[in-house]
Amino acid sequence: MTGTYIACHHCGQMHERSALASGQRASCVRCGTVLWSQGVLNSTAWLAIVLTSLIAFTIANFMPVGTITAVGLKSSSTFLDAVAATWRAGYPSVAIMCFATGFLMPLLDILILAWLLAFSRQGRVAPGLNLLSRWLHYVRPWAMVPVFMLGALVAIVKLADMASLTPGAGLWAYAALTFLLTGLSKLNSERVWLLAEQDGAVQSMPVSIEPQHHPLDCEVCGQITMSTADEGHCQRCHTRVHYRKPAHKTRTLAILLTAIILYLPANLYPVMINTTVLGGTSSHTILGGILELWNMGSWDLALIVFIASFVVPLTKIVILAILLGRPAKGRRDTMMHYTRMYQTVELIGQWSMLDVFVVILLTSLVNFGPLMTVRPDVGAAAFGMVVVVTMFATMNFDIRKGWDEVDDDIELPDYQPAATAPTFT
């Protein structure tokens, strides 16, 4: 049986690729995951959004986020100033994490999209398409501009009682960039390849379904490659692909244990230290900062920070532990619940970085020498590492392995290698 197929990244079920009407989407018949959709925007429209994002990104990073006035002195800061101040304060690990997630990764994301779409809209294959789409797939989860924007709002509220703050052009540009990048989050590497197909720049390669072969699913371009081995290379974009991620439970468990170890100092040690002439030196843990916001009357932001900085990382750790300890076999409805839990962890992964961004921004803005300073502390470095490590743990886990062992209680075609038509909405 030869044709064009797509595999669900969450359960492995194969489906025949069908043309969709504008605004329509196809969902997996087995686990309900959205497989692909037909948006209303073409390559030209997406390119316009990307170029607008690049302009907003430039303004956001090279214009001050804000200027504070205290004791007759003024201090302003861009995002890059905040990174540099954190480095000078003696925490290069925090500075590197913030530079990568708040500047480098978003910039790469935007530039790669601009390059690929500029050629796609002309019906041409972009030079470096295989490599750049692979980079886009790996870079995307680490671009955290919306998280920094929320962190900037929290920092503004924290500064309200310390000094007078005037929002800068960089802050408004970050607000616009957050909106634009939220829209661009739908334009992943697979969607870029799908647009290139629609523009005639590339073609999907038909495959022959044979019982003795494994379907190797490429998460970069969506192409199915049939192979007798458990691993190989995508026949279209040449990305290394596996039938299932090797030793996924062992690796995930090792990474998760690292996150648990780091989680303790992240919450017990201060994330920042305030020094003032009149008030002396005071330190704040994550929970201490939340209580401070609550006492200031900003209960809404206190709730947001509590969820992002305490509930989210703990939830990720608990859910991954549940997934690792699930029974070897189970029913389809149970596996559906596990899949939704895993998708939740994928969705909330980066938002724990909120407090780290707050700390670096305060470090840069509140810098008045012996009169008033803020600097990061051990808790910020540990907390940033918790965010990074839990995201790696999520990426290493393979939820499809659980579906391989499911006793399906609904009528479906044979799981492998037969394919079925997806459901449409």
Image: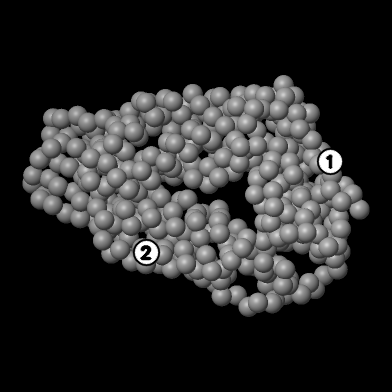
Q: Residue at x 60, y 35 (%)?
A: 132
- Classify mark 1: helix, strand or loop: loop
Q: Is residue 291 left or right of residue 44?
A: left
Vertical side of 417 occupied by 115: above or below: above
Task: Name the image quarter holding residue 412.
Answer: bottom right
Q: Could you say where residue 226 lies in the image, as x and y percent from the top left?
A: 79, 53
Q: Position of residue 298 (x, y in %)?
A: 34, 50
Going from N to C along the chain, the mark reached first, 1 or 2, is: 1
Q: What residue occupies the far left of the structure in this picture?
A: 278
Mark seen at residue 263: 2
Query: Where is residue 18 drawn, in percent x and y?
Result: 84, 44
Q: Secondary structure at mark 2?
A: helix
Closer-to-camera residue (392/82): 392
Image point 32% across, 38% down: which residue?
83
Which amino acid type is shown beneath numbered disc 1? Answer: Ala
Mark 1 = which residue? 19
Task: Specify the amino acid type for callout 2.
Answer: Tyr
Q: Crowding at label 1, few (<14), some or many (≥20) Cα neighbours within 10 Å?
A: few
